[in-house]
Image: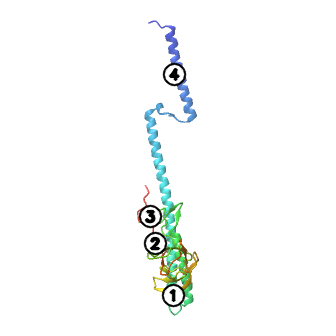
Amino acid sequence: MRVTNNVIFDTFRRNLQQSTKLLLTSQEVMATQKKINRVSDDPVTAGIVQDTRTKLAVTDQFLRNIGRAESTAILVDKFMSQTTDLIARAKELMLSQANSATATEATREAVAIELISLRSQALTIANSRVGSRYIFAGTDDTTMPFPPMTATGTAGAGNTGGASVFAQVIDETSASGDDYQIQFTAPNAFDVVNVTKGVTVSSGNPYVSGGDILFEGLLVRVFDDPLPPAAGDTFDIVTTLPGVYNGNSNDLKVE
């Protein structure tokens, strides 16, 4: 068989190109420290690598989940221990006043003040957060589980005047949690009545639009809106005690 110069040249050129390609591939492997730099290098092995990467990512996520769950569990244990101490102290204080021979009005007043402080500390613990998430709110962890005491004012349905009302708790230590009513005996005078206990807190108070009405830890303001109140108008003040749970009882689950 006759081998021409062209055949020799083409064969040499193919061999040279193949050697150059192998050289470039080897240089790329050495530079990147990766045997596979693109799927076309080895499709089968590339698929195995991608599957391994996916499994590693899932494993890393599991480890992060475990870390978050563990840190939350440690905090919950710490806060529950603190709450147990508060309850024990409250029990100790109440038992100290059970003996009528040693308890006096002054000691009971002092104990009441400390109990209010203990309640405040317990609510602070119950509203603890990790980042922006409330720990004890169940799955509704963006909602404060135990909001502070609130007061809401509403105008009576039968009012004939044009006034509105605003109410706010300004001192929880003095607030009783009772409900009240502002009763206008005249357009320029009103009484404050504790409707829970059925007693009058104050009477014959002069009315000034937007003026502060202070009683039992609450601040109430009645405004001309746009008309003043009329005789016989009433404004209900409803208070909500702290400790009313706003979260849910759903289980917290971590994969």
Of residues 232 and 35, the one nearer the viewer is: 232
Q: CA distance from mark 3 to mark 4?
A: 65 Å
Q: Earlier in the sequence, mark 3 or mark 4?
A: 4
User: Which three-letter amino acid code belongs to the residue tagged 1?
Assistant: Gln
Q: Residue furthest top?
A: 2
* Disc 1: which residue: 97
Q: Which mark is residue 138?
A: 3
Q: Which mark is residue 244?
A: 2
Label 3 crowd (10 A; few <14 / some 14-19 / many >=20): some
Q: Which mark is residue 18?
A: 4
Label 4 crowd (10 A; few <14 / some 14-19 / many >=20): few
Q: Earlier in the sequence, mark 1 or mark 2?
A: 1
Nearer the viewer's eye, disc 3 or disc 4?
A: 3
**Does residue 150 appear anywhere in the picture?**
no
Q: Earlier in the sequence, mark 4 or mark 2?
A: 4
Q: Position of residue 178 (x, y in %)?
A: 48, 80
User: Which three-letter amino acid code belongs to the residue tagged 4?
Assistant: Gln
Q: CA distance from mark 1 to mark 2?
A: 27 Å
Of residues 3 and 111, the one nearer the viewer is: 111
Q: Earlier in the sequence, mark 3 or mark 2?
A: 3
Q: Is residue 52 above or below residue 209?
A: above
Q: Secondary structure at mark 4?
A: helix
Number of numbered tags placed on the structure image: 4
Nearer the viewer's eye, disc 1 or disc 4?
A: 1
